[in-house]
Amino acid sequence: MAKKLIKREENYSQWYNDLVITADLAENSAVRGSMVIKPYGYSIWEKMQAALDKKFKDTGHSNAYFPLFIPKSFFSKEASHVEGFAKECAVVTHYRLKKDEVNGGIIVDPDAKLEEELIVRPTSETIIWNTYRNWIQSYRDLPILVNQWANVVRWEMRTRLFLRTAEFLWQEGHTAHATKNEAIEETERMINVYADFAENWMALPVMKGSKSENERFAGALETYAIEALMQDGKALQAGTSHFLGQNFAKAFDVKFADKKGKLEYVWATSWGVSTRLMGALVMAHSDDNGLVIPPKLAPIQVVIVPIYKGEEQLSQISEKVNIIKKNLEAKGISVKFDDRDTQKPGWKFAEYELKGVPVRIAIGPRDIENNTVEIARRDTLEKETKSQDGIENYIEELLVKIQENIYQKALKFRENNTFKADTYDEFKDIIENKGGFVLAHWDGTPETEQKIKEETKATIRIIPLDAEEEKGECIYSGKPSNKRVVFAKAY
């Protein structure tokens, strides 16, 4: 069996990295800052992808694909956008290699310099809006509701598996609308789609809100986000949706003729989530024994481990197991029957505990005699003995209970780690010694937020959409404030 995990309280960062690697989710690659997503990790991502893809299509969106390479000149057309991404851009300058005749080896061919350098996609607004110019002539061409599943490259200096890598997988929606209100409605609709996915599939409670000017997406007029709290008290941005106004339409001259024939600039949105959600899943729910995966996203929802001596016992057990497996699969439950003879049952129990399989069934000769099975829950580590009769109905209900229990546990953790602060000293004490979400008054200026960040490393995660009006004073400047915002240290 793989090495025992360090406890979260001893070194949370090492626990996370070790768990991602030991549970076969991902590993570092030969390319600095990039990762290999292993089959077990990718199968979780595929489940996320399938659920989100259905939600996108149910809200009227279609998938497309746009180029990985973006002409450098495109980035210079939207000033705040290029400024926001300039430090992270990977640039292609040449298109050919050749043999080094002097020293041997391979070198870049100096005669193969590109006429215009290409940016490796950090995000696709520019290439997509250049394309939309050809697609949009009149109001009849709108709205365009497009999403793409893709990889992007952001040249990060400090990387961490899933949370921050030089290359990562994501989806990015890019929509075009005839009116400002339609675009704003779309922006709000999609942050609600993300929140629904996070809570009902990932079992991850999230706060919804808008970003401050300092935290807003480069080129957006408004950014909405969902923020989740990890077990170490840090926040993780789990999804964003941006109202881009007419900034990109103006930059790429995308106009449409309205019903009166008048030319107007198009209104835009973009929205996305990434494989960072995998990191959120691990950090929000897992424990010192390994992964805890909500049943809706578990590649294997039920594993059945036989306990036997000799081929005859295995044959008897397999006969019963195949009936149970068939009945479970008929209910759409994914089942693995692990009858390998290369590992002992105890080793298998530990492996599936580490990998976060929600339900484990053990069945041995005594169970065959008594018509029973032993059922172990991954979320609570509780075991119980149940009759084999109608076991598929019991398991189906149990998976629903486990999904809900994982959510409620994460919700309770967030509630216990959300605090109010009315003075700067109180704020600093919570941020430094407790972590979590801190609800505090802020005067609304980027300067104050920047000062707080420099002094405490805490940022405004969101300005809650449902924040109550409450007169108060900014914890830093003492200036008037009419509602609290959510601060935290963040990934």
Image (cartoon, rainbow, N blue to C red):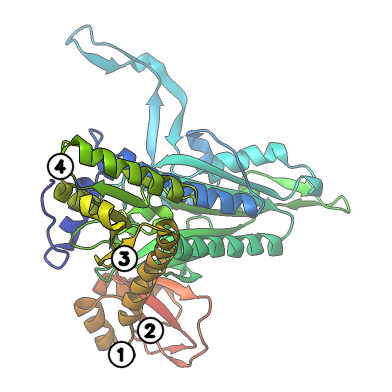
Return the residue at label 4: 309
- In terms of depth relative to the viewer, which is nearer, 394 or 96? 394
Tally the numbered discs: 4
Residue at position x 29%, y 69% from top? 489
Kind of residue sitting beneath label 2 = Ala
Q: Which mark is residue 440?
A: 2
| Residue 479 sits above or below residue 238 on the image | below
Element marked by disc 3: loop
Look at mark 1 in the image and give the residue it sits on: 423
Q: Earlier in the sequence, mark 4 or mark 1?
A: 4
Residue 378: x and y, percent?
Answer: 28, 61
Question: Dot 2, how many residues are within 10 Å of its Cα: few (below 14), some (14-19), or many (20+)?
Answer: many
Residue depicted at 29% across the width and 55% down the height: 360
What amino acid is labelled 1 in the image? Thr
Pointer 3: what residue?
490
Q: Is residue 327 above or below residue 432?
A: above
Near mark 3 (Cα within 10 A), the count class, few <14, some 14-19 or many ≥20, is many
Front tag of 4 and 1: 4
Q: Which of the labelled discs sits on residue 67, or is there none?
A: none
Q: Residues within 10 Å of mark 4 (few under 14, many from 20)?
A: few
**Spatial separation of the CA atoms under disc 3 and disc 2:** 16 Å
Q: Looking at this view, is 68 or 61 the one in front?
A: 61
Dot 4 or dot 2, earlier in sequence:
4
Quarter of the view holding residue 437: bottom left
Counting residues from the start of the chain, the first of labels 3 and 4 encountered is 4
